[in-house]
Amino acid sequence: MTQTSDNVTWLTQEAYNQLKAELEYLSGPARTEIAKKIEAAREEGDLRENGGYHAAKEEQGKQELRVRQLTQLLDNAKVGEAPADDGVVEPGMVVTIAFDGDEDDTLTFLMASREYASADIETYSPQSPLGAGVNGKKVGDDAEYELPNGRTASVRILAAKPYSG
């Protein structure tokens, strides 16, 4: 779904629409809701010891940060087609790998940028060590990537299918 190179992020139309809808919600109804929470907490009195006020202000800050992130992402987005179902690992693919050739020790993940991460499937960025190691490989290929401790890990690509949501 997404691949970042320089400041351009490639998105499928579906991913773009989903992120745009999130931005519209956060910029409109969610802003109104948080403003009401802040106002209600402010009416309770002393702001120095008002936990509800401070929690609402913190929530507002996180929400505004997400609005800025989404705005920047969508401003730099290029909408493209979903990847071909050709067994080649690339952004937008659900990839299954086996660690060190052990067919029982597998991991299935979506190759996409963090902005498209969801609770439904683990997401690895194409710029992550694992993502960079498997990007461009085909089903059946072996790949290596560097672990945080400096060692190298080997994986075999078992499957690569376009993400369908």
Image (cartoon, rainbow, N blue to C red):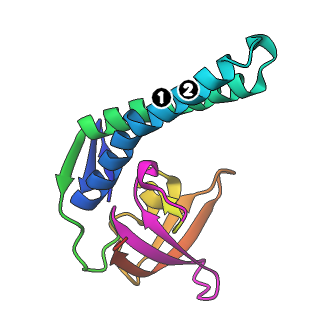
Residue 49, position as x, y percentages in the image: 82, 16
* Residue 107 seen anywhere in this rendered image of the structure: yes
- The magenta span reads 91-119
> Residue 69, image x and y in percent?
41, 34
Residue at 69% across, 29% down: 55
Q: Which residue is drawn at 22% across and 74% down?
A: 84
Does any portion of residue 57 appear in the rendered image?
Answer: no
Instruction: Give the image location of residue 64, x and y in percent.
Output: 47, 28
Asked if residue 100 is positioned above or below residue 153 in the image, the reply reads below
Q: Is residue 114 toward the left or the right of residue 79 in the image?
A: right
133 over 49 or under it: above or below: below
Say if the magenta span includes residue 5.
Answer: no
Q: Do the residues labelled 1 and 2 touch (CB within 8 Å)?
A: yes
Q: Look at label 2 and name its amino acid.
A: Gly
Q: Residue drawn at (37%, 38%), measured in percent from left and top? A: 70
Task: Give the secondary structure at mark 2.
Answer: helix
Q: Using a 10 Å C-alpha cutoff, classify the residue at mark 1 as few (fewer than 14 neighbours), some (14 to 19) or many (20 or more).
A: some
Residue occupied by mark 1: 64
Q: Quadrant of the C terminus?
A: bottom left
Q: Residue 61 carries which label?
A: 2
Residue drawn at x 65%, y 50% is 148
The amino acid at mark 1 is Glu
Q: In which quarter of the image is residue 38?
A: top right
Q: Does the magenta stretch include residue 114?
A: yes
Instruction: Look at the image and tell me in which quarter the N terminus lies.
Output: bottom left
Instruction: Give above or below for 159 relative to 89.
Output: below
Label 2 packing within 10 angstroms: few (<14), some (14-19), many (20+): few
Q: Tell which of 123 and 59 is nearer to you.
A: 59
From the top left corner, tell me how far across and down residue 135 is, in percent.
37, 63
Judged from this view, the residue extending furthest toward the bottom is 103
Q: In front here: 164 or 153?
A: 164
